[in-house]
Image: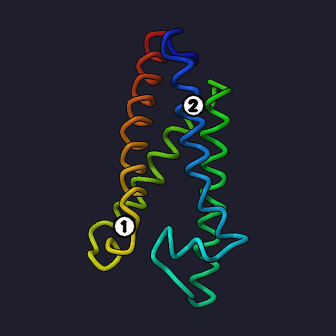
Amino acid sequence: MLLPARIEPAARIVLALMGVITALPAVAIVNAGILDWNYGVSDPPPTTLALLQHRGMLQLLLGAALTWAAFHPPVRLGAALAAVAGKSTFLTLMLPNPAIRAGLAPSGIVFDLTCIVVLGLLAAYLVMRRREA
């Protein structure tokens, strides 16, 4: 569903940027060094490395969905809800523990919180519009 004409171009840009930034942890699949910058994890044990690289792949898929949503409005609600669920779960698991929280990049926390708010508002708007139709 398209947004009002005055908002649609900005929404496309925001969704595409969120998608690209969300997908960045996928770099860990080919360069494990990014894990230190992203999560404060350097030289992880093999199982931890594999799990974090797998997380990178899942982030790539979520980022691709958000980018797709920028240019294909019918998938916006699903992509927004998936991102809100994924990012909320991540923060809920990580932020309560001070030891874990200390290793997280503050910019990543702010980005995820911003995505949760913006995509939550988008999802609410899309649900309201569907009910009106």
How packed is label 2: few (under 14 Cα within 10 Å), some, or many (20 or more)?
A: many
* Residue topped by disc 1: 93
The residue at the far right in this view is 30
Q: Where 43 sits versus 38, above or below?
A: below
The residue nearer to you, when weighing 74 against 53, is 53
Q: Position of residue 71 (x, y in %)?
A: 67, 27
Which sits in the foreground, 121 or 22?
A: 22
Who is closer to the viewer here, 44 or 85? Answer: 44
Mark 1 touches mark 2? (CB < 8 Å): no
Q: Position of residue 110 (x, y in %)?
A: 36, 51
Q: Image height check: is 41 above or below 53?
A: below
Mark 1 → mark 2, Cα distance in angstroms: 26 Å
In the rendered image, residue 91, in percent from the top left (x then y), is placed at: 37, 60
Dot placed on the residue nearer the N-terminal end, 1 or 2: 2
**Amino acid type, callout 2:** Arg
Q: Amino acid at mark 1?
A: Leu
Display colour scheme: rainbow
Give percent across and percent down for residue 105: 40, 64
Q: Is residue 125 left or right of residue 11?
A: left
> Up-down: is 66 above or below 29?
above
- Secondary structure type for disc 2: helix
Instruction: Assess disc 1: are there few (<14), some (14-19) or many (≥20) residues with their C-alpha within 10 Å of its C-alpha.
Output: few
Residue lying furthest bottom in this view? 45
- Picture residue at 45% right of the left edge, 76% below the top: 40
Residue under label 2, please give it.
76
Q: Residue at x 59, y 66 (%)?
A: 55
Image quarter in which the N terminus is found: top right
Q: Secondary structure at mark 1?
A: helix
Residue at 52% in and 23% down: 10
